[in-house]
């Protein structure tokens, strides 16, 4: 087997298409090499080897050693040096590179190949002993941490002590001799911690680093990251070994990262940062605050540190040229890493850049308009679920702002919450339902869980490409980074801002758009959905086949739904119309009524409420289809619980509290989700269905008279399992329809259909379709009843199922295509066989989930229906499903 792929000198054994084998970094290094771009030579050990490594007790195949040696020789030949050579040593970097990028999750070792003898060769060759020993001590530090598992602090302490002893302020004051001293101290420290000395043999170093990269695939933060991003463990990582180039060779050297377009706004302007005389990870680590690459960005940021454009115009021009080429070649915004060694530019990485949802829209629309991609490609490129980010609130511009600090606008959106200083505190507060802002000096990959739990993230150090910024953008969470005027005092547990001291629990607001940090809570505005958003939506609407409706039960929800582009209401849960304080009393009277007469009294109070709501909803929807579902109240959601509630209902009904308590107890169910709900209520008490049908038809008549346009209500019967149930309820509906029509002397067109949310209904769908003019798949209940898992109690054990790999995803979030989906497919086919033009839709939560929407397209449903805020996501996902 070929485990090793070499690249360098304008040639490469791999290509960009080999991501699965070579990982993202390796495949793109190979591609850049083939494009003739300046890439230090190197080789990639494949992801297949990672799989082999784990399948064989963390060991390598026999032939690997020879392949690595041959590759090292080839790299040395291209670089004109030899690994371990005492005169012209080849130094390498060793980096991970998975198929999907996992920024900062796995380990890297730089300057590998340095030892007591090669360091002198480097000093002699470069004539720069300071640089040589600085690189050596960096290597010892990194290697000891990543490969030997020693703590960072060991080295930090030695460094700090030396600095103090010598009276230095910054690392750059260290002379070659000083670094030699530090190195001796490092080595002594290592020997004290480990049994042996720091490894001097470059080959031992190399295999140590390769092993560490493969091992890092299974480190806890990588495992967490994969879980959060649905990256399979089986993919594995590749290892990239590459000749070192040095950004720390003096004032004419630098290292940086850049995006070909602004990753926050999507604006077509190269955006990036760099550090002079620095090495690789320094930029991402956020240790020094970096400088802008372009002059324009520098001016915008109001920075007084010179841009790369001014400082190194030739390297800058070469970089701009390459950035443009790469964007054209990959036809997407690129995220680049580069190093300048003594004025010469080297490319170290290119990949599709992570971006905010807003930037993704702008880049896609711009690129389609530039002719770089098609409109369909633009539609496909947007992560439908990420549109959610755009629906986040922003700070009301008219609101007074009590600014206590300012940092970089690292990730858009605004958030308010209590200050917490640790990820643990963030998680704890979240589990108690409190909203928090995670405040840190700088985040590290260990903070992922805390960032997830927080509403927003604030750091006092680091740039736009720092860990906090990159991860927050990926999560769609507001983030302000590098707010240097703020100070976190961990000892005192306070945040010091403009002379004021804030402690954990104090409320602040961060504005990811301006970088401001504000005291207290601040009024927010809902976002405007125009510009690029509506352009992509219009392209999506041209492409999709399925309609998108909303689940809405109030006129205000209906208005929101329409503003998001809903093409009808797919589910109006009439019981939700009574959640309101003033109304739940009448609902409770109805449910608790002992006799038909009492029930009719209660129903007569409900009728006008329902009718006026329906009229308003019909008006808002202006002729678009509206599906109204008859009452489906799981009793436990509606029965009075407290003594006050019981007393209140008792007095409204004119009975004693005791009597009412007895009645409540009599109605108590052990399995309310499988209890006296849905059409079962209508079978027991037909007058309920009759009242609702009357409200619907009277409202339709009224709305039609007002608007002059016909209203065609779709009346839906819930929780049907048998044709006979449906027929029983349908007969009542039809009777009331006739009555209302004759009372009003008009014709009303209407449909009667059913939910399919029980396995029996799906299996007998052909029979049921004889009476039902439409089916709406209630996949919440269908999932519950297919799995036999309670909707209300699943959360307590589904997490264990996920953690143990028994299920991949919560079936209540993303449709179980194999099981529940099979029932949907069966019912659709059977329904169509009997009634060719039967309308088919879905109205469970899955109607707003992109993966489930893809499935709905394959079954050929006519529409999906979801909550108003997910309508844009569903429109886009439906388009993507159709492409
Ligand atoms: C369903 O069961 O999928 C559904 C939409 O109805 P509800 O959630 O109201 O039970
Ligand atoms: Mg249901």
Image (spheres, rainbow, N blue to C red):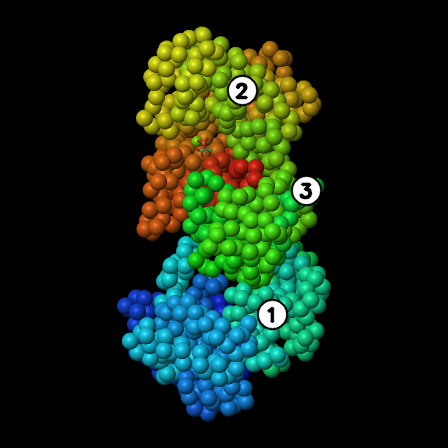
Q: Nearest the camera: 341 or 193?
A: 193
Image coordinates for residue 57, horizontal then vertical, percent:
28, 68
Residue 554 lies left or right of residue 316; in this view the side is left
Task: Pinpoint residue 415: horizontal percent, then vertical percent.
Answer: 57, 45
Q: In which quarter of the image is residue 94?
A: bottom left
Quadrant where the image shows the N terminus: bottom left
Provide residue 690's location: percent of width, then percent of height: 49, 16
> How far apart in space, not on screen, are marks 2 and 1 (Cα)?
61 Å
Left or right position of 287 against 727: right
* Cβ at disc 3 under 8 Å from ligand 1: no
Local secondary structure at mark 1:
strand
User: Which is more toward the observer, 752 or 594?
Assistant: 594
- Identified at 47% across, 60% down, the residue is 444
* Left or right: 568 in relation to 438: right
Mark 3, residue position: 400
Per the image, label 3 sits on a secondary structure element best described as loop
Residue for badge 2: 582
89 up-or-down from 769: above or below: below
Q: Residue 274 carries which label?
A: 1
In front: 164, or 866?
164
Residue 593 at least partly seen: yes
Q: Which is nearer the N-term, disc 1 or disc 3?
A: 1
Q: Nearer the viewer, mark 2 or mark 1?
A: 1
Does the residue at mark 1 contact the one at mark 3 (Cβ under 8 Å)? no
Indicate which disc, 2 or 1, sits on the residue closer to the N terminus: 1
Mark 3 closeness class: few <14, some 14–19, many ≥20 residues within 10 Å: few
């Amino acid at each position: 087997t070929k485990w090793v792929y070499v690249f360098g000198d304008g040639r490469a054994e791999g290509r960009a298409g080999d991501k699965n084998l070579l990982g993202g970094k390796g495949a793109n290094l190979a591609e850049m090499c083939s494009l003739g771009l300046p890439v230090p030579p190197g080789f990639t050990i494949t992801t297949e080897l990672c799989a082999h490594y784990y399948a064989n007790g963390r060991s390598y195949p026999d032939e690997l050693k020879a392949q690595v040696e041959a590759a090292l020789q080839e790299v040395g030949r291209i670089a004109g040096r030899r690994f371990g050579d005492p005169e012209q040593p080849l130094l390498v970097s060793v980096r991970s590179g998975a198929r999907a990028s996992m920024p900062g999750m796995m380990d890297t070792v730089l300057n590998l190949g340095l030892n007591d003898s090669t360091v002198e060769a480097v000093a002699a060759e470069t004539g720069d002993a300071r640089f040589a020993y600085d690189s050596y001590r960096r290597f010892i530090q990194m290697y000891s941490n990543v490969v030997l598992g020693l703590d960072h602090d060991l080295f930090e302490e030695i460094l700090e002590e030396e600095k103090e002893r010598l009276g230095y302020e910054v690392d750059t004051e260290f002379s070659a001799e000083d670094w030699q001293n530090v190195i001796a101290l490092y080595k002594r420290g290592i020997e004290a911690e480990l049994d042996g000395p720091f490894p001097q043999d470059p080959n031992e170093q190399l295999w140590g680093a390769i092993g560490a990269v493969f091992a890092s695939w299974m480190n806890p933060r990588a495992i967490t990251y994969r879980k959060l991003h649905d990256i399979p463990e089986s993919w594995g990582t590749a290892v990239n070994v590459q000749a070192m180039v040095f950004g720390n060779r003096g004032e004419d050297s630098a290292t940086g990262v850049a995006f070909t377009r602004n990753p926050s706004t999507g604006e077509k302007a190269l955006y990036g940062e760099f550090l002079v005389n620095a090495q690789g990870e320094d930029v991402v680590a956020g240790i020094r605050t970096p400088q802008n690459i372009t002059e324009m960005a520098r001016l915008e940021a109001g920075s007084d540190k010179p841009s790369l454009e001014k400082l190194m115009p030739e390297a800058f021009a070469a970089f701009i040229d390459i950035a443009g080429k790469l964007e054209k070649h990959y036809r997407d915004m690129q995220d680049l890493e580069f190093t300048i060694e003594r004025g010469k530019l080297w490319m170290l990485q290119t990949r599709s850049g992570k971006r905010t949802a807003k930037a993704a829209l702008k880049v896609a629309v711009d690129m389609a308009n530039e002719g770089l991609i098609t409109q369909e490609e633009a539609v496909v490129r947007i992560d439908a679920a990420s549109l959610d980010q755009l629906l986040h609130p922003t700070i009301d511009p008219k609101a007074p702002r009590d600014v206590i600090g300012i940092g970089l606008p690292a990730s858009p959106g605004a958030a308010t919450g209590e200050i917490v200083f640790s990820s643990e505190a963030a998680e704890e507060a979240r589990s108690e339902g409190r909203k928090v802002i995670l405040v840190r000096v700088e985040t590290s990959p260990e903070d992922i869980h805390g960032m997830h739990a927080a509403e927003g993230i604030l750091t006092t150090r680091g740039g736009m490409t720092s860990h906090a910024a990159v991860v927050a953008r990926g999560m769609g969470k507001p983030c302000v980074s590098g707010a240097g005027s703020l100070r976190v005092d961990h000892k005192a547990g306070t945040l010091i801002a403009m002379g004021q001291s804030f402690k954990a629990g104090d409320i602040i607001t961060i504005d990811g758009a301006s970088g401001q940090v504000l005291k207290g809570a601040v009024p927010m505005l809902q976002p405007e959905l125009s510009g690029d958003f509506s352009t992509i939506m219009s392209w999506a609407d041209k492409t999709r086949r399925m309609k998108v409706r909303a689940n809405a039960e109030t006129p205000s929800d209906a208005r929101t739904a329409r503003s998001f582009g809903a093409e009808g209401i797919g589910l109006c849960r009439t019981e939700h119309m009574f959640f309101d304080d003033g109304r739940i009393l009448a609902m409770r009277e109805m449910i608790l009524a002992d006799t038909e007469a009492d029930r009719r009294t209660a129903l007569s109070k409900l009728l006008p409420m329902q009718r006026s709501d329906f009229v308003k909803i019909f008006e808002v929807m202006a002729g678009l289809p509206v599906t109204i579902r008859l009452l489906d109240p799981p009793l436990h959601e509606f029965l009075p619980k407290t003594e006050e509630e019981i007393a209140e209902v008792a007095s409204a009904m004119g009975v004693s509290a005791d009597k009412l308590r007895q009645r409540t107890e009599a109605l108590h169910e052990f399995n309310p989700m499988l209890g006296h709900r849905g059409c079962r209520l209508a079978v027991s008490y037909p007058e309920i269905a009759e009242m609702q049908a009357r409200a619907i038809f009277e409202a339709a008549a009224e709305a039609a008279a007002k608007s002059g346009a016909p209203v065609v209500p779709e009346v839906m019967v819930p929780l049907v399992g048998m044709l006979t149930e449906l027929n029983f309820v349908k007969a009542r509906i039809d009777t009331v329809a006739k009555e209302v029509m004759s009372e009003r002397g008009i014709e009303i067109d209407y449909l009667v259909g059913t939910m399919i949310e029980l396995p029996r209904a799906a299996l007998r769908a052909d029979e049921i379709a004889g009476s039902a003019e439409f089916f709406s798949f209630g996949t919440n209940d269908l999932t519950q009843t297919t799995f036999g898992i309670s909707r209300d109690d699943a959360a307590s054990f589904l997490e264990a199922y996920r953690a143990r790999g028994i299920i991949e995803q919560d079936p209540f979030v993303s449709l179980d295509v194999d099981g529940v989906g099979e029932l949907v497919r069966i019912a659709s086919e059977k329904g169509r066989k009997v009634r060719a033009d039967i309308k088919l839709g879905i109205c469970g939560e899955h109607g707003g989930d992109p993966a489930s929407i893809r499935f709905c397209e394959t079954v050929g449903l006519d529409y999906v229906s979801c909550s108003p805020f997910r309508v844009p996501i569903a429109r886009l996902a439906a388009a993507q499903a159709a492409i």
